[in-house]
Structure formats: structure tokens, C-alpha cells
Image: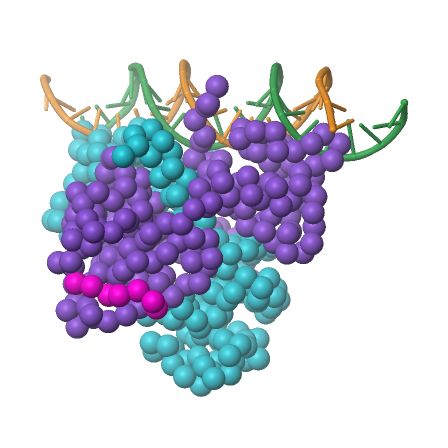
Chain colours: A cyan, B purple, C green, D orange
Amino acid sequence: VPERISEAVIRRLPRYYRQLGALEQEGVSRISSLELSERMNITASQIRQDLSRFGGFGQQGYGYNVSALRRHIAEILGLDRKYSVILVGAGNIGQALSNYAGFAAEGYVIAALFDADPSLSGGKAGAAPVLGMDELEGFIEANRVDIAVIAVPAGAAGQAAERLIKAGVRAIWNFAPVDIVIDGAVVENAQLTDGLMSLTYRLGELMAKKPT
Amino acid sequence: VPERISEAVIRRLPRYYRQLGALEQEGVSRISSLELSERMNITASQIRQDLSRFGGFGQQGYGYNVSALRRHIAEILGLDRKYSVILVGAGNIGQALSNYAGFAAEGYVIAALFDADPSLSGGKAGAAPVLGMDELEGFIEANRVDIAVIAVPAGAAGQAAERLIKAGVRAIWNFAPVDIVIDGAVVENAQLTDGLMSLTYRLGELMAKKPT
DNA sequence: TAGATTGTTAATCGATTAACAATC
DNA sequence: TAGATTGTTAATCGATTAACAATC
């Protein structure tokens, strides 16, 4: 019964993957759901429940093999292959993302950036070329593009998304402070200010409880 | 009965706030939960449920006043005042965040950046000074700091968090790919790669369903 | 007033936790 | 074998949705 994996589980998978990588680095080769739960603020029960959805990766009386489990999760997440990524918007965030080594390490290869500002086009950001927005569709047609990042101002984000979808892109990682609602593609919203605001809310709660 | 607001609701508040800002800009002065639901991919029922937790902001037969509701939510989120923010780590992400105009617009003022690399300290990032890591505790003592952003490599993040908490910081926004688990402070994890990986997972699902 | 739409209560659905038999 | 720990089923908890009386 290939039951649909819930969003909540999907969001925990990268955390497992990261934690297992750290354990591997520490030279830990086996771990129980209980030990893992202590490191992650997740109950042992939930860890077992989560992992068992994808198969019996553990062994009774023993626990889980760290490296093997990490490889399994990598495969589940689709990290066993490379992804070609383009960035629409070569401003602050676009530049920072293109220089972030963490992505390349997991197989995300930045193929190009696009920007409306003609003074940027022709340049480079990291190893990738910066092209003009008019070259977007042509580039997508000529090159495989798996994921597009939207890193343009709010006002330009909707149109950028439409162009990307129309050109055939099926995955969008959106940093613009706008909700992008489309179907036929997957969208991950990464609104930085949203996170900052919920942090602020919780800070307010904390101060109300224990003021100082 | 001042019931505890769930995490799920808190995460929707910034979205309401943003959407109401957009509506205000479009010149829309009133909106019903049904209309709002269509713009946001949230059910009308949930919107009413969420908003009513904080008070009766709407009016039967009319809906919600856009500007008034936006102001209410701003107040709930604590956006009616300024926050002093420091960034630990002045690399890619630190620099990009310090140049991002969206934060200043909501009252988040970057007071300083700190970096372990001595060649950076003494410089500026946007309007804020870049200081050495040895100046961290002294700065926090001498200046009010509401929120600290961790934008250092994974290996340095844990120690940075400890120093910040010890120095009295009560809110941490963590960009390092490490789970920071502490109590007595609120932590918002903003692991960029995690978002990218769940996007990749969902892309895999999409392709499996509708291959092309 | 009649129509519209909220705020709220109750019903449903889904996710988390607890418990334990299976088994390495 | 005895002990440990999984995988899974059942119980609980919480969040979402539906429905409708209250009311502008």
C-alpha cells in the first residue's frame, strides 16, 4: 500500500539526513531511535513511525546502521543524482545562494543566473554566467533545468513564475515575499521575513512569560 | 481563556500580514474570509478560526477591514516596534541578509556583524560595522540586542549559539545546517538546504506521477 | 428588512504518542 | 538464550473543516 507521505514527514527527512551525516562524521556507526530522538527533539516513536513508512531500515535489538540509513534517506530525497538549477534575480540573495557551497555539495549545480538589470548581464556569479531576462526561455529550451529559484523583488515574482512554468520548469524555490500558487509544478516558499516574524512573535510570548 | 496559540497558526500570521499589505496596495479596503481564502490557498473556515483566536476583527455581513486587520496582525506579531539584530558570520549569507531591504522595512535594524576572519573586521556591511568575534560579548553588554542571526559554517554554529545565550540573547535565527536545541530562548531554524531537499522530494513525486 | 458574513461549536480528519508482539 | 529495540497497531491528541446561529 503506497500511502501518500505527509508534508510533516517530508519536512523531517532532511533533518534526519543532516543528523546522520553529523553522526557519520563523529564516527558513530549505529544508533537507536531513542538515542537519535535525544539529539533531535523528536520522539523515538515518531522516528520509528517515520522511517518505517519507507521500509524496514532498522533491526530489532540493534537499531539503525548510520551510513546505510543515511544513504537510504538520500535516495528517498532524490539526492542520488545532480540537479541543474537556475536563479532568476542576481541581487543580494541570488548572489549569496550562487556562492553557497552547501548546495553544490548535495548535487545542486547552478547553471545560470538571470537579471533584468542589463549592467549585470554578461558577468559571472561564482562559476555561473549572469544572463539577461530575455535569454531565459531560450536557455531553458537549450539546457536541462530541474529547479528555478525566484530571487527577484515582490513585484516581479508572479511574472517570473509564469514565464518559468510556461517554459517547462517543474520546481520553483521562491524567495520573493509573495505566495506563488500554481499547479502542475511544485513550489517551495522560503520567505525569509516570515520566519523572522514568527520568531518575533515567539520572542514576545517568551518575554511576556518571563520578563527581564 | 488565553489559550496557547499553536505553531501552525503562528506560521500563517506572516502570510496574512503580507497578503493584507498587498491588498492595501491594490486599494482594496474590505475583504471577506472567502475572498481571502481564494487568494491564499487556505480555507475560509480556517481564516475565520485563526483570526477569531485573537479577537473579533471582522463584522458579520461585511467582512474584514483590510487596513485595520493588517494593523492588528502587525501588533500581534510584534511589528509595532523596532528590533536590534546582530549577525554572527559575515560571509555570503550574512552579507546578503544585511543588505536585504525587506528587514529594515519591518523594523529590524542590523546593529553589527561579527566574523572570525580578522581581515573582515573593521569593515562595513551595508550601514553596519563588521567586528571581530572577540568583541561579541562586549557589544551585547553595551548595546541592546533583540535577535541574533547565526550565519556561520556548521562547525561553528553550536559554540556561537552558546555564547549568544550566555551573553543574554533570547532569540536566535539559525541559518547553519545544524539543529540548535536550547531552552530559555526561542530559535527559528532557517536551513535553506532543508527546504531545497523537500522541494526535490516533491519534484520526484511529481515526475513519478506525470513523467515527461 | 433581507442578505451577507462572521464567530463559534461540533464533527472530522490526520498526525503524534503509547504500547507491545515480533525478532534480531 | 536473554536483552534490546524495531515495526506496527491502537489510543490519544490536536488541527482542520463543516455547519449554523448570531448579528451587522
B202 or A101: nearer the viewer? A101
Q: Is residue A171 one of those drawn in magenta?
A: no
Q: Residue C23 at x, y = what percent? A: 24, 27
Residue drawn at (18%, 38%), measured in percent from left and top?
A: A31
Q: Is residue A36 above or below residue B53?
A: below
Q: Is residue B148 left or right of residue B9?
A: left
Counting the numbered discs, the total is 0
Q: Is residue B3 above or below residue A50?
A: above
Expressed as whole percent of the image width and height from the top left, the position of residue A100 reads 31, 66
Q: Position of residue A62 (x, y in %)?
A: 17, 33
Q: Is residue B88 left or right of residue B100?
A: left
**Within the image, what quadrant is residue B99 found in?**
bottom left
Residue beneath the point at 28% across and 70% down: B124
Residue A40 can be seen in this image: no
Report whether D16 appears left or right of B149. right
Q: Magenta region: which residues?
A: B126-132
Asked if residue B131 lies in the magenta stretch, the reply is yes
Asked whether residue B191 appears in the rendered view, the answer is yes
